[in-house]
Image (spheres, rainbow, N blue to C red):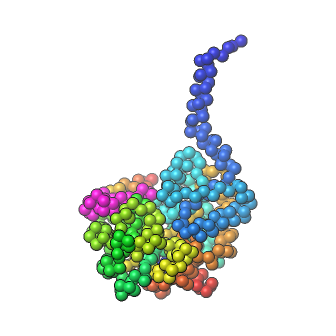
């Protein structure tokens, strides 16, 4: 397991953007859209994707 | 000769009040107070023994760095509060000297210029006989410099109740489809749910959700660290599986949506969940607190999805903040390096937050581990095995 394990930012590496995604709970909010707010998975993932794109874009511009 | 009237007194008092409340004044005061202590923020491991030994380590590091015990402030900060509390302390110009940082938080705070460059220290550690796991290096590097010191490497196995599997006459599931069917056979809600999947607004949820999505071919971002791929058919498939487990099959407790990072630990440790995906801190906790449950606990790879089995590994690191009035922080980290060479606590079953060789030894010696990969493919694997082998693990 330790031989082939990947970081939570997989397939990306640990980066400042990955850190902000983790700290702002973007993915937990996505899954709660589905489980609590009864959104369709595709809609929840679309919202989640936009948020992560915004975060990564900001850091990649810097 | 001038005279001071009531209006002048009020003006002076007002000016003094404004000065006292201004941010620069408060920062200056807090820095003056901070100069008396080396402040270490500890984020709990969920394993009391690990917390205790880590505290001993910090004081030992400080001693080696020439500090008196009274010069060290060891503060415990709840994982869920750490981000907000750290942001506030940075804003006030008063962060801790040293803190445990999870994964990409090294890059997150490092990119903002807050962390000390510890490349010299990490370079020395890499060259030493016991070295640093190469895969951990990605967790501390930013723009070619090391901004953190790797402290622990954690695999995330599935902790599984072997006794319940045996009672139901079923094997540990190899796929997520099997996992759902097996779960329905072994659970007895509301007392016992099969899957203690963390679903609260906390880091463990990101870990648990992404781990399942990987098995369905999903991911958050491509290896270029630019192309976000969250909105994919593979991720939709994986999320639908989680939705079905929660709503249709009801193998996840409803309360999991409000769990903090310790929720899945507590669910397993109190026998309210039969499976959890978590670092082996749970196994280590059982080693100290519940030998009976430990005997019937197995550690397994995550079940496979259409794209196979993918397992998570994370790294915790020491980070030292630049904005502190106590330059001995760097010395403390060097002392940590020296102590690490001796590994005086490696034989104790600590679990999360401490060094991987120790944890691996715990897994290899005591747990019923299903091994997927017999041959290591990177240096870290070789080092892990070598260290375990060298001490009879």
Residue B238 at what x, y percent from top left? Answer: 31, 70
Residue drawn at x 59%, y 27% is: B15
Q: Nearer the viewer, residue B147 or A5?
A: A5
Q: Nearer the viewer, residue B206 or B169?
A: B169
In which image quadrant can residue B70 be found?
Answer: bottom right
Residue drawn at x 49%, y 78% is: B293
Residue B143 at what x, y percent from top left? Answer: 52, 61
For the record, the magenta segment spans A20-48
Residue B296 at what x, y percent from top left? Answer: 47, 82
Residue drawn at x 52%, y 72% is: B281
Residue drawn at x 35%, y 79% is: B186
Residue A47 magenta: yes
A40 with respect to A3 (left or right): left
Residue A53 magenta: no
In which image quadrant can residue B31 be found?
Answer: top right
B131 shown above or below B112: below
């Amino acid at each position: 397991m330790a031989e082939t394990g990947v970081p939570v930012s997989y397939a990306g590496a640990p980066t400042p953007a990955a850190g902000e995604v983790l700290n702002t709970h973007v993915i937990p909010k996505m899954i709660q859209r589905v489980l609590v707010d009864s959104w369709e998975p595709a809609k929840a993932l679309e919202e989640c994707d936009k948020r992560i794109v915004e975060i990564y874009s900001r850091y990649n511009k810097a | 000769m001038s005279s001071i009237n009531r209006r002048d007194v009020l003006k002076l008092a007002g000016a003094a009040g404004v000065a006292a409340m201004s941010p620069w004044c408060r920062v200056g005061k807090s820095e003056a107070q901070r100069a008396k202590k080396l402040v270490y923020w500890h984020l709990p491991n969920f394993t009391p023994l690990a917390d205790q030994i880590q505290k001993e380590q910090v004081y030992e590091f400080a001693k080696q760095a020439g500090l008196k015990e009274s010069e060290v402030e060891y503060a415990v900060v709840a994982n869920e509060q750490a981000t907000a509390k750290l942001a506030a302390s940075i804003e006030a110009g008063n962060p801790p000297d040293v803190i445990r940082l999870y994964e990409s938080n090294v890059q997150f705070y490092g990119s903002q210029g807050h962390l000390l460059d510890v490349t010299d220290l990490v370079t020395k550690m890499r060259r030493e006989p016991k070295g640093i796991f190469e895969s951990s290096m990605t967790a501390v590097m930013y723009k070619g410099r090391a901004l953190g010191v790797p402290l622990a490497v954690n695999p995330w196995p599935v902790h599984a109740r072997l006794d319940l599997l045996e009672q139901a006459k079923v094997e540990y599931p190899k796929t997520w489809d099997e996992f759902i069917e097996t779960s329905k056979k072994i659970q007895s809600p509301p007392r016992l749910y099969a899957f203690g999947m963390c679903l609260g607004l906390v880091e463990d949820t990101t870990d648990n959700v992404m781990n399942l999505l990987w098995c369905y071919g999903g991911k958050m971002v491509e290896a270029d660290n630019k192309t976000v791929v969250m909105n994919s058919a593979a991720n939709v498939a994986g999320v639908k599986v989680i939705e079905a487990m929660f709503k249709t099959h009801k193998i996840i407790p409803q309360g999991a949506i409000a769990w903090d990072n310790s929720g899945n630990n507590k669910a397993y440790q109190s026998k309210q969940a039969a499976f959890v995906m978590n670092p082996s801190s749970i196994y280590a906790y059982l080693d100290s607190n519940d030998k009976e449950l430990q005997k019937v606990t197995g550690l397994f790879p995550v079940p496979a999805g259409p794209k196979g089995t993918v397992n998570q590994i994370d790294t915790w690191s020491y980070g030292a903040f630049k904005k502190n009035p106590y330059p001995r922080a760097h010395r403390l980290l060097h002392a940590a390096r020296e102590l690490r060479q001796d590994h005086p606590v490696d034989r104790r079953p600590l679990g999360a937050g401490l060094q991987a060789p120790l944890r691996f030894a715990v897994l290899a010696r005591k747990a019923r581990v299903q091994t997927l990969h017999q041959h290591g493919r990177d240096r870290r694997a070789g080092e892990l095995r070598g260290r375990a082998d060298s001490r009879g693990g």
